[in-house]
Amino acid sequence: MPMNEFDAIDMALLELLVEDARRPYSDMAEHVELSAPAVRDRVTRLQEAGIIRRFTVDVDRSLLNGGIAVLVTIEATPGAVDEIRQELIAAAAVEHVYLTADTTVIAHLVVEDGKVREALAETIDMTAVRSLNVELLEHAEWTPGLQGTTLALECAECGNTVTAEGESTRLEGTVYHFCCPSCADRFVERHEEFSQAA
């Protein structure tokens, strides 16, 4: 099956992995009526396409000692939103980062009791913060779901949706998807020019 052709079985596999990322291929194979090797190949293809970025562990922090959970809402100064978001993503204390349509950054952190300000000052450039609100979280539950979604790859060259007529190319270990051969050719040509200039 070509890299850019995904179907209902791929969506079913994604839903199974969202429920339990450690689910064995043999178990998933029973659900989608394929062989375990065929399921493994499909999961590998989803990883190579960038749809599955990583497999993670959902830790129940209530069973661990240390740290309090807080929800931080940040209004950044103009032009600083992306920088603050990236700093939060890179911080070990940060569980989740969200960016709203109005460029508000919201983060879920677990920090030492009484050291919220210190943790934030070590994580982000406070001079780029217009306003800050910190709330104590009593409980957090992560329940990802795929309902109402479809697989939609975006062309790396023009941004259009990649259909069955599209193609995929691996450059320096990264898979790129294109809506048509001409977009792929332009992208590869520009990539080669940048590589030779470097």
Image (tube, rainbow, N blue to C red):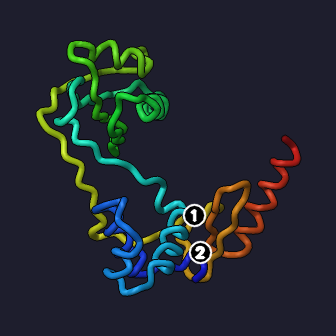
Between 13 and 71, the one lying in front of the other is 13
**Is 187 placed left or right of 167 in the picture?**
right
Between 128 and 40, the one lying in front of the other is 40
Alpha-carbon neighbours of circle 2 within 10 Å: few (<14), some, or many (≥20)? some
Say which residue label 1 marks.
48
- In three-dimensional space, the C-alpha distance between marks 2 and 1, rounded to whole angstroms, equals 8 Å
Q: Quadrant of residue 132?
A: top left
Q: Are marks 2 and 1 in contact (CB under 8 Å)?
A: yes
Q: Residue at x 61, y 67 (%)?
A: 177
**Is 50 placed left or right of 69 in the picture?**
right
Q: Residue furthest right?
A: 196
Q: Position of residue 72 (x, y in %)?
A: 26, 28
* Label placed on residue 93: none
Say which residue label 2 marks.
3
Q: Residue at x 33, y 37 (%)?
A: 95
The amino acid pointed to by label 2 is Met
Q: Position of residue 127 (x, y in %)?
A: 42, 14
**Is 143 placed left or right of 189 in the picture?**
left
Alpha-carbon neighbours of circle 1 within 10 Å: few (<14), some, or many (≥20)? some
Does dot 2 land on a helix, a strand or a loop?
loop
Does dot 1 land on a helix, a strand or a loop?
helix
Looking at the image, is 143 positioned above or below residue 97? below
Q: Quadrant of residue 191?
A: bottom right
Looking at the image, is 109 positioned above or below residue 154? above
Q: Position of residue 192 (x, y in %)?
A: 83, 55
Q: Residue at x 28, y 70 (%)?
A: 148
- What quarter of the picture does the C terminus occupy? top right
The amino acid pointed to by label 1 is Glu
Between 101 and 21, the one lying in front of the other is 21
Q: Quadrant of residue 108?
A: top left
